[in-house]
Image: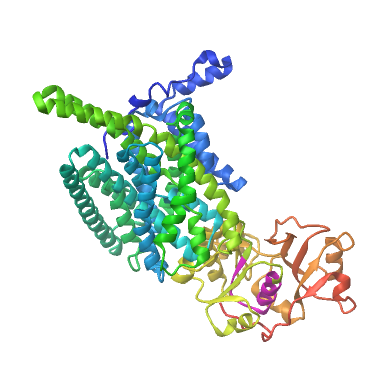
Amino acid sequence: MVEGVFSAAPFDALHAQPRLSDVPRSAADLLHALGAMKPGAYVALVIAVSVACQWIAWRLRVPSILLLLIVGFGIGQVVRAENVLGHQILFDGVGILVGVILFEGSMGLRLQQVRGLGRPVRRLTSVTVLIAGALITTSAWLLGFDIRVALLIGAILVVTGPTVINPILRSLRPTRRVASLLRWEAVVVDPIGAVLALLVFQAVTAGEAEAAVTSVITALVKTVVIAVVIAGVVGVTLEALMRRRAIPDFLHGVVFLAAAVGALELSDVLQPQSGLLTVTLLGIYLGNRPKLRLEQVAEFSEHLQVLFVGALFIVLAGRVTPAQLVDVLPTALMFLAALVIVVRPASVLIGLAGAKVTRRERILLVGMAPRGVVAAAVTSIFALGFGQASTALSAQAGQAAGHDRDALLARSQDLAMLADQAAKMVPLVFVVIVCTVALYGIGVNRLAERLGLASANPQGVLFAGVHSWVVDAAVLLRAMGIPVLLVARNSATLAPARRAGLATVTANILSEFAVKDLDVSGLGYFIACTPEDEVNATAARQFARVFGEANTYQLRRDGYATGTEVERRDIARHLSARFAFAPWVSRAEMAERVASGMTVSRVDLAPEFTLDDFYARYGDDAVVMFVMRGAGTIEVVNGSTKMPTDSGALIALVRIPSDVTPIVAGIAPARTSSYPEGGAASR
């Protein structure tokens, strides 16, 4: 990486701290305390604020990156990271955090996920990148940037990045194909953008055309060779240690983290900006090794990624001042319009021409190109690099004489001019990041829903295991507009579900396919109802990583009860999921109720038929499974669910009295199941 990345020299005047006389005394005291903050206090502040912003964004259902950028911008006007931590520490820290984020993201790129997507992925990470880079460069040049600075901007802004794509995908949950395309593009193009920026910078600072070409070719070859060699050696070593059980379980996460950071720094020492490519290749290699168990590593890295993303955006956003924004805003808005209206549509549509990607998928890909932390970090690096190169040439000129001195001074002045233009890149990219995150992060929800490729508020239900009542409940849910998916190990037991027109998948719910490759787009709840309680508990723990613990359920375990002796024999609470339905019932008890004549039905509540009327009519043996509070919105009922009293609808297992007609009770009986009594359903 270029030395002195976060040197404040070009921006000292713009980053002046607020004057205490400009604010009330109480606020002035606070500003003074923040301005004199110690490194430990600043790091604690960044961590606390980043976590708080991400939690608030989750509650408000808005992109967390947007909130982080806004809050980070505000904090940066009071206290700047480089003033507290020092330029070199901040520079090194940002490089390491970005590398860890890319390592975590690349470990999740499984080659099996792109079966049938090989050509689209290759085009997104090659042809699309070249087209986007050319169009971005042209746009920057037309807006007044020198062609050399425009080339640098074009190289930097071809990236999207996992720091912005992953949070959006977490809330959006699109189809597996779309998610795979977006993840591969984000993770792979990030280091490509950094390498391209390095090549452009070296070409510009090299001077004459012949020297520039030689410098670019040499840098490219060195970058690729060093990245492949280091990633290969470190990857093979880690794999061998894991297969020989040479690393204890409690050290898996930290050993892989240390290896990734070491590979990153070694690569950057040998060739600047090659470290990001190295850790990306390392993560892809490790994530695709057969039978290499990396669950603990993935969980550890995922938690770090969430923390690091928040910290990075707060720190980097704080480097921009209001004065810089005002100065660059008109240009930035025109540039943003070109990115959204011209660059992304043209690069995707041309780049994917002839590839096996549906029209709806192309449209969604066009509407998803937010820029992330790598763009911000790399921009800061090279924006200051021109000034440092100019200073270095000026120093050389002072020691030279004659024609050499004049040539060095001319090059120094030329680079100084480029440094003035490059200084505008930092606020320009900040505006691009904020606006693209807001535009794509918020607007993509409606677009994806209209295209039928995702749901911003997924309500569908994934059933693991099949029984007659499962099929009946799934039919009613589908009739209410709720997506459903039934997974069972035995294809024959899924036949009634297929005859009912339900979506089914034949697979062991604990298989590698189900855990990692099952398409769960549009699904928001998981209910494990296989015959084995241990399978239900294990599956629920696995799918809690996808749906969240609050939306993951299993049926009550057979023999479950309270009391000291029973709890000694029962499964530990942390190894089990929440129990579904009210009251809690086991699979055997559900089968007994079905065998006794109870049926799954929809019951509409109204002022004339309230929840009390429901229980008075159907008794305590009724099992309430789902509640619909509004159109297209359901909730799995559990022991703590607050039930509606006189509105909405229930899906419940009830015994319909012989003297009650469906119209009087507001019941829409489910179809009659073709299952044999006792439910021979399999897992």
Question: Residue at 35% of width from left, 68% of height from top?
Answer: 291
Magenta segment, prevailing SS (helix, strand or loop): helix
Looking at the image, which is closer to me, 308 or 578?
A: 308
Q: Is residue 140 left or right of residue 457?
A: left
Region in magenta: 461-478
In the image, is residue 537 above or below residue 170? below
How many callouts does the rendering have?
A: 0
Q: Is residue 528 left or right of residue 180?
A: right
Which x, y percent locates residue 431?
Answer: 47, 38
Check if residue 473 falls in the magenta segment: yes
Which x, y percent locates residue 438?
Answer: 54, 45
Question: Residue at 9% of width from left, 24% of height from top?
Answer: 402
Is residue 157 visible in the rendered image? The answer is no
In the image, is residue 554 above or below residue 421? below
**As drawn, which residue projects farthest toward the top?**
21
Looking at the image, which is closer to me, 90 or 158?
A: 158
Looking at the image, which is closer to me, 592 or 304?
A: 304
In the image, is residue 569 above or below residue 385? below
Which corner quadrant holds the C terminus? bottom right
Which x, y percent locates residue 144?
Answer: 38, 36
Which x, y percent locates residue 222?
Answer: 19, 50
Which corner quadrant holds the N terminus? top left
Looking at the image, which is closer to me, 283 or 438?
A: 438
